[in-house]
Structures are given as structure tokens and as C-alpha cells.
Amino acid sequence: MPENTDSEKNLAKYKHKLQLYRIILEKMLLAAILVIVVYIGNYYLEEHKNSLTTEKFLLESRLTALKELASTHSQLSQKLIALINPDLNKEDGRKSYKDLIEEFDEKLTTWKSLFSPRFDIDSNMYNWFHYAIAHEKVQIDKDDYFFIADVLSGFDQSIKSALLTETLGEKTENAHAIFSFPEWNYHELYNSGSKDAFDAIKKKWKSSRKHMGNTVKK
């Protein structure tokens, strides 16, 4: 009988130890699961924070680009208007005008990658338009003033519309800038000293503006 009692006691102790080990293992497993969950949660939280930081940085960068491009475009417009004014000093104005054209081209080239492909303004054409006038490749008279004003105001609306749309994150499919240059040969404009090229551009410009107006009405 004593031997049976000892065996029962030993068996009870063994079962008790097994139960303790089981409880300890369960707690260790639970702790491991909690550690994994916390780690994964922190990882995704950090990724989310990084994503928000990136979006904020891009937003601030786009706002900076918008302000800089709009400012330089405004200066370009003022210089062009001053240049064709017969009462102002042409040489000083022409030099600063040329410098501004290069500045605008550099900024637009640098920052264009910030924006989506919807930013489809033909900046090369716009620069050549200014370049041809600044380098006296065309002769401007009063009959051209309205055309020039239309180009300046059109590009002004276009750049603000396109950049603001991208900056504010407006997700509109098939959205495009409201203005773009017609397909003309700007090398012809640059290389020609006659009014023929400029007049040909004006003709295409008017046709393009008329077409754009019909598109908007539809």
C-alpha cells in the first residue's frame, strides 16, 4: 500500500508539473504572438507615417513650384509688354527679358517631374514664342498686341489650372490643361525674320482657339 501511495503522489506531482509547463508554454506563445502583432503594427504605422510625410513633402514642393513658375511667368509677361512699348528703353529690357526666358525654362524643366503627365503644356513652344520676340526674329506691331495678350493670358490660365489641379490632388480622369499651343514649326519662327511666319502662327492660333472654344461648349 505505501508503494502505491508513493506512486500516486509521484504521478500527481508529474501531472502538476506538466500542467505548469503547459501554462508557461501557452503564456510564452501568447507573448510571442503579441510581440509579432506589435511589431507588424508598428511597421505598418511607420510606413503610413512615411507615406504621409512623402505626400506632405510633394504637396509643399508642388506649392513652391506653383508660386515660382507663376511668379516668373508674370515677370515674363511684364517684360514682354514693356519691350513692345515704344516709350521704354529696349536694350536693358531685352537683356533681362532674355534672362527670364532662360530662368523660366530651367525652372519648368526641373519641376515638371513633380507633376503627372496631365501637365501637358508645351513649354518649349512657349519659350520659343518669347525667344523669337526677345531676339527680334519677328517685328511686332500694334495689330499683334491682342494675339500676344491672348497667348500670355491663355498660358497664365493654363499653368495655374494645371498646377493647382495637381497640387490639390484632384483625381479627374482624362483631365487636361485648358490651353495648349497648336502644332506649328517654331524653328520656322526662329529662323525667319519676316512677318510671314508670325502671321502663319497667328492663323493657326486663332484656329486652335476657335476649336478649343467649340470643345468646351460640347
Image: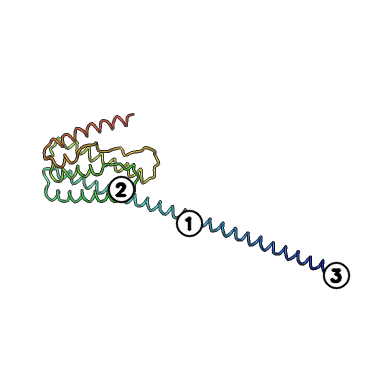
| Residue 46: image tag | 1
Question: What residue appears at the point 79 percent right and 65 percent down from the top-left corner?
Answer: 12
| Type of amino acid under label 1 | Glu
- Residue 112 appears anywhere in the view: yes
Residue 190: x and y, percent? Answer: 16, 42
The image quarter in which residue 53 lies: bottom left
Disc 1 versus disc 3: distance between alpha carbons? 64 Å
Q: Is residue 133 above or below residue 99?
A: above
Of labels 1 and 3, earlier in sequence is 3
Secondary structure state at the residue bearing disc 3:
helix
Of labels 3 and 2, earlier in sequence is 3
Of labels 1 and 2, earlier in sequence is 1
| Type of amino acid under label 3 | Glu
Disc 1 versus disc 2: distance between alpha carbons? 29 Å
Q: Which residue is mark 2?
A: 112
Secondary structure state at the residue bearing disc 2:
helix
Question: What residue appears at the point 11 percent right and 47 percent down from the top-left corner?
Answer: 90
Q: Residues within 10 Å of mark 1 (few under 14, many from 20)?
A: few
- Residue 66 appears anywhere in the view: no
How many circles with numbers are drawn on the protein? Answer: 3
Disc 3 versus disc 2: distance between alpha carbons? 92 Å
| Residue 151: image tag | none
Q: Pick the residue in front: 195 or 70.
A: 195
Q: Which residue is mark 3?
A: 3
Question: What residue appears at the point 12 percent right and 46 percent down from the top-left corner?
Answer: 88
| Type of amino acid under label 2 | Lys
* Location of the C terminus (image quadrant): top left
Question: What residue appears at the point 34 percent right and 41 percent down from the top-left corner?
Answer: 118
